[in-house]
Image: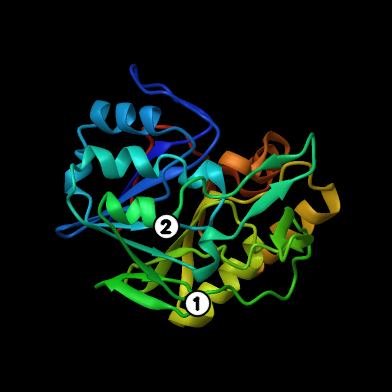
Amino acid sequence: MRITILFENHSGFKKGLFGGHGFSALVEHKRYKILVDTGVDGEILLRNMEALGIKPADIDYLFLTHGHYDHTEGLKALLGARRGKKLTIIAHPDIFAKRVALKPHLRDISLPFKREELEELGAEFILTRSPIQIVEGIYSSGEIERTTWDRTVGYRIESGKLVKDDVKDDIALILDLGDSVAVITGCGHSGVINIAMHSQKVMNKSIRALIGGFHLIGAKPELLEEITEKLKELKVEKIYAGHCTGFEAMGFFMTEFGRAFEPLYVGKVIELG
């Protein structure tokens, strides 16, 4: 399996690639191409895809890790570039929930498009809370079982009232590598340890690699130490982190895991056997 980072906070080292706040990755497995998230800017996503030789019409499936704008705002541009070609989108049923953040100011952080307007452009949604096989060897985690995480991200609007949002729609893509699995997270709002343990439980296999954003910006050292200890206990072999992980957490992981840790950037390719 091959994973190529298409959208990330950091542009990396290849000329002609652009960074931006958000995440998107392409998974290539056998004859299938599965896109994970679309970043925050459709123009940047399409430019990076073109620079890397990836055609929007060649994408077989889109997997959305959760319904925040920085993972979904490229959706409309992607669908438009396919010129009406249908695209199956796998996500959690709460993906279209209305969400706001209060800091640093009141702002909408929801998926910025209505389901109907995306369907008019060719989107076909599969919304499920349960783990499902997307293609042979690639699975949706389904809703993540949580035992260690209690950081809410913002608020949802329900019946005209603000309620704390625990982002239950935060799911992960699981890649079956035979003797182990790799797990791709978007922001890791469910908690990176919960995601790892849940994926291990769903697949009954050890975790070779964790890839994506871990939502650890501003995390206290005690939390980073706890996460590191648990990842070592779970015998996670490789960690590829970026987006919302934060520089402090990435530096901490680099110190703790050495060569087993690598930062993400646009254009980075990860080869998994």
- Residue on which disc 2 sits: 115
- Residue on which disc 1 sits: 129
Query: In front: 193, or 258?
Result: 193
Q: Can residue 232 be seen in the rendering of this structure?
A: no
What quarter of the picture does the C terminus occupy?
A: bottom left
Which amino acid type corresponds to the residue marked 1 in the rendered image?
Arg
Residue 52 spot, x, y in % from top left: 25, 31
Instruction: Tell me where residue 177 sits by quadrant.
Output: bottom left
Instruction: Answer with mark 1 or mark 2, whichever residue precedes in sequence.
Output: 2
Residue 157 spot, x, y in % from top left: 71, 59
Which amino acid type corresponds to the residue marked 2 in the rendered image?
Arg
Residue 54 spot, x, y in % from top left: 22, 37
Q: Secondary structure at mark 1?
A: loop
Q: Is residue 51 left or right of residue 263?
A: left
The single residue placed furthest to the left in the displayed view is 31
Q: Residue at x 66, y 53 (%)?
A: 99
Q: CA distance from mark 1 to mark 2?
A: 18 Å
Q: Indicate which label's residue lies in the foreground, 1 or 2.
A: 2
What quarter of the picture does the N terminus occupy?
A: bottom left
